[in-house]
Amino acid sequence: MVTNIKSKNLLDLKSHQILHLWFSSSFPIGSYAYSHGLEGIIDDKLIKNKNDVLEFIKSILYEGTCRNEYIFIKAVYGGIDINDLVLANCASKERQLETLKMGDAFRKIMSESWGYTIDNETTFPVCIAQAGIKFHIAFDDLVDFYIQSFISNLINMCVKHIPLSQKDGQDCMVSFLGMMKSFHNTMRDYNLDDLRSSTFYADIYSMKHENLKSRIYVT
C-alpha cells in the first residue's frame, strides 16, 4: 500500500467529513447497479410491500451480508488479512463480481484522488477497512456508515423496482436505523469464528439472477 503527500494532507479532515464523501452518491463506485439478488426476488413476487422489505433487511442485517461484513471489517481493523476469506464466503459468482467491482472502483478513486493505493483484486469491505485505518476513522463510525449505505441502496432499489412510495422507502430507513443499536449490541463481541449466513433466498436468487432473461441490475 502506497501513500503520498496528498493523502497526508487529507488526514487533517474530520472523520465524518471523509465518511460522508466516501458513502455519498457523488463517490463513483456504482453501487446503484447492484441489487444483491433482490431483482430476482421482486420479479418472482416474493417481496411486494414495505413489510416484506423490512423482513428482508432484517435478515440481511442480522443473518446475512451485513453481519459477515461487519466481522470482516472488524478483522481488518485487527490486522488480519481476510481478502481471500471474503471471496470464499460469497454465495455466488455475482456476489464475487459485486464485491470485486465495487472494490476496484473504490480503489481507483482512492489512488487517483486521495493519493492512497490499495492492492488490485481487493474486495469492497477490505478496501473500506484499509482506507478507514489509513485515515484514522474509528471502527464504529466506519461500520455505521458502511452498513447504512448498503441498506439504503437496497431500499432505494426496492422503491424503484417493486415499486414502493417514497414515504414507504423512508419508513424502511427509519425502521432500519431503529435496528442499529440492537445490531451493535449483538455484534460487539463477534469475530471470524462467528461468520455464518442463513439468508437462503437472497443467496439462491443471487445465483438465479445470472440467468434472468431481462435484467436491469448487474447482480
Image: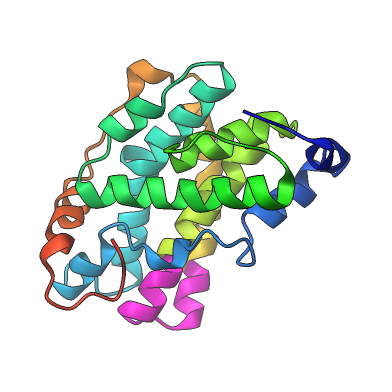
Seen from the viewer's position, the closer of residues 103 and 169 is 103
Picture coordinates of residue 141 (x, y %)?
67, 39
Q: Which residue is drawn at 32% across and 78% down?
A: 161
Classify residue 78 by image quadrant: top right
Quadrant (top left/top right/bottom left/bottom right) for the C terminus: bottom left
Residue 39 sits above or below residue 162 on the image: above
Side of 44 where 140 appears, left or right: right
Residue 96 sits above or below residue 136 on the image: below
Q: Which residue is drawn at 36% across and 72% down?
A: 158
Q: Residue at x 43, y 36 (%)?
A: 69
Picture coordinates of residue 50 (x, y %)?
36, 71
Whether residue 105 appears in magenta in the rendering, the answer is no
Seen from the viewer's position, the closer of residues 181 and 23 is 23
Asked if residue 186 can be seen in this view, the reply is no
Seen from the viewer's position, the closer of residues 31 and 1 is 1
Picture coordinates of residue 179 (x, y %)?
49, 47
Asked if residue 91 can be seen in this view, the reply is yes
Residue 118 sits above or below residue 188 on the image: below
Whether residue 168 appears in magenta in the rendering, the answer is yes
The number of numbered badges drawn on the structure is: 0
Side of 190 where 5 appears, left or right: right
Tell me the magenta residue range.
155-171
Classify residue 123 by image quadrant: top left
Residue 184 sits above or below residue 80 on the image: below
Side of 8 where 135 appears, left or right: left
Classify residue 25 by image quadrant: bottom right
Quadrant (top left/top right/bottom left/bottom right) for the N terminus: top right
Q: Which residue is drawn at 51% across and 63% down?
A: 173
